[in-house]
Image (cartoon, rainbow, N blue to C red):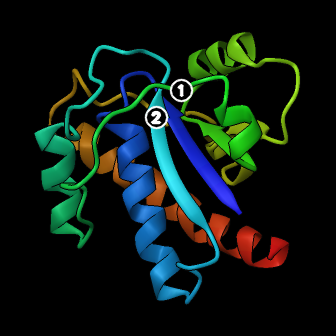
Amino acid sequence: MEVLFVCLGNICRSPTAEGVLRHKLREAGLAGQVEVSSAGTGEWHVGNPPDPRSQRAASVRGYDLSAQRAQQVSRADFARYDLILAMDHSNLRNLKALHPGQGKAELDLFLRRFDAEVDEVPDPYYEGEQGFERVLDLIERACDLLVIELKGRL
């Protein structure tokens, strides 16, 4: 099983989701059964590490994002990944526009699957530290539920 998280630049939300899910999969004993990655629909940050504010907020909660580097979504990703989860409606639209019309990937909003109140992970880039904490709160809760879903698929 392969999961790809997608946001705009792949430096805040999607690398946070990648790091949190990797951690939770290790805790659940599923690390070897699920591959996790992240990418952006834009190419501005390709090759860069996650935003320092994302790394700090994640580190406080025990997640290490330091080895990650931003990459851009490609058409090949639709054939590679089983599940591609966008952080917001805009990125889901971008993914649908890029979709080659074939491939095994199931596309969805990350939070729509798990949160009845909120369906988008807000972009914290122009927010203060509280924005990054809110992103982590949403992602942690959704990743807990995603681990349960993935267990059922394996």
Mark 1, secondary structure of its residue: loop
- Residue 26 in picture, x, y percent from top left: 46, 82
Residue 26 vertical placement versus 66 (above, below)? below
Indicate which disc, 2 or 1, sits on the residue closer to the N terminus.
2
Numbered label attached to residue 39 = 2
| Residue 104, image quadrant | top right
Give x and y (percent) for residue 19. Answer: 37, 59
Say if mark 2 contacts mark 1, CB within 8 Å. Answer: yes
Give the amino acid type for the residue marked by disc 1 in the picture.
Answer: Val
Q: Amino acid at mark 2?
A: Ala
Between residue 135 and residue 96, name the one nearer to us.
96
Who is closer to the viewer here, 105 or 92? 105
Q: Give me the residue at 70% from left, 44% from top.
A: 80
Check disc 1 and report the residue beneath it: 73
- Which residue is more in the foreground, 54 or 49? 49
Residue depicted at x 24% and y 59%: 58
The quadrant of the picture occupied by the C terminus is bottom right
Q: Residue, x 27% and y 67% (percent of image)?
A: 63
Q: Image height check: is 33 above or below 12?
A: below
- Left or right: 60 in relation to 106: left
